[in-house]
Amino acid sequence: MSTHKVVIAGGGVAALEALLFLRELAEERVEIDLLTPNSEFVYRPMELAALFRDERPRRFDLNRIAADQGATLVGDRLEGVWPDGRVVTQSGSVVRYDSLLIAIGARLRVGVPGAITVAAPGFRQEFARALDDLERGFARRLAFVAPAGIGWLLPLYELALMTADHLAERDVAAELLVVTPEDAPLEVFGIEASSHVDGLLTERGIELLSGHRPINVDVNGLVAAPAGLVEVDRVVALPSMKGPGIRGIPETFAGFIATDRHCRVLGMDGVYAAGDGTAFPVKQGGLAAQQADAAAAAIAAAAGAEIEPEPFAPVLRGLLLTGAEPHYLRHDLTQPAAESETADRPLWWPAAKIAARSLAPYLAARPGLELRRTT
């Protein structure tokens, strides 16, 4: 029996979820290359919580994960895709594929000029200085803002709530403000969850300015539409995103990859995409994993596995860290009118930050894959 050659480009949540689920579905029918310049998988959803505990995010050994799944880790970056079933890498190598899954994520950009940008180089140090300024009285009012066009704003509220908890523990009388283009906080989760988050903000004394689009930060404060000038001393903003920009792959105006219900790239044979690089508007790890599952099932069927691939049917699961008790949020995006679920107990298992069918239990069961800090 000839094997089906699969190239998975990426080393993040979507790529690893696809690797695990594809191996489960297709077993020895597939030969898998994991194409990524990285040797580590960084568990990024916990980065914000780590800010307040002087910790670093958890990291896992990609070499060991690939070897465990019988895959070949190729230390290179995807640059382009040729129409005859080949990809070209950053080093100039050419790799053949029968099926290709693009899961390399999106490119982060400054969303609000002049603000401290989450996940940008130096963010950890800049945010620490902002907290220090509040504690020393050099600053009084801190805003957390989201640029327009961002579909996943949970990190914004998480950072605001954890900051409020951090300052309250130190008896710092600072003013915190959330500025968002949304009509209501975390409205992507539905009315019930949004109302719940609004209550959390009120309890912590965090002011909410909804329906406003941040434009930039100048010496006077935050400029936002339609309010104009919002007087603040420091501003922390989520980044904006741009698509991966891969040669040979059709893309939207913003550079994202359009896919069908089975996560096939529109207009291409044997090419799939999952994660932040796709045109799906909500960029979130759990949804990326669900896209990866849909793509893996379609690839497994193409490789001869006797399955009926299920399409991508997004269910949003979010674990909101607050500094105190965590809150679990769930909403079926295929039924936007349905009520959302909120709870202070897990609504999925394992109760990981990223709810991924294969990846979450895999990492939980293999603590030996985690890389330990040596310094």
Image: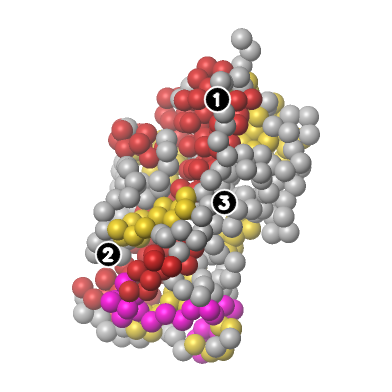
Write down the residue under mark 1: 307
Sequence-first disc among 1 and 2: 1
Q: Nearer the viewer, residue 306 or 113?
A: 306
- Answer yes or no: do the residues labelled 1 and 2 have beta carbons within 8 Å? no
Give the vertical position of 229 relative to 186 (above or below): below
Identified by mark 2, the residue type is Gly
Circle nearer the N terminus (2, 3):
3
Q: Report how far apart the C-alphas of labels 2 and 3 lie in the structure.
A: 27 Å
Please name the residue shown 41% across and 52% down the image.
Answer: 317
In the rendered structure, the answer to whether residue 308 lies left or right of residue 66 reads: right
- Residue 117: percent from the left, percent from the top? 50, 68
Identify the residue shown where x is 49% and y is 43%: 289
Q: CA distance from mark 1 to mark 3?
A: 27 Å
- Amino acid at dot 1: Ile
Residue at point 52% right, 17% down? 28
Local secondary structure at mark 1: loop
Residue matched to label 2? 323
Within-10-Å neighbours for mark 3: few <14, some 14–19, many 20+: many
- Mark in the foreground, 1 or 3: 1
Measured from the top left, where is residue 197 in percent x and y? 36, 69
In this view, the residue farthest toward the top is: 1
Q: Indicate whether 153 appears above or below 58.
A: below
Q: Which residues are magenta?
A: 200-223
- Say few, some or many: other residues with alpha carbon within 10 Å of mark 1 (under 14 / 14 to 19 / 20 or more): few
Q: Amino acid at mark 3?
A: Asp
Which residue corresponds to mark 3?
Answer: 276
- Marks 1, 2: nearer the viewer: 1
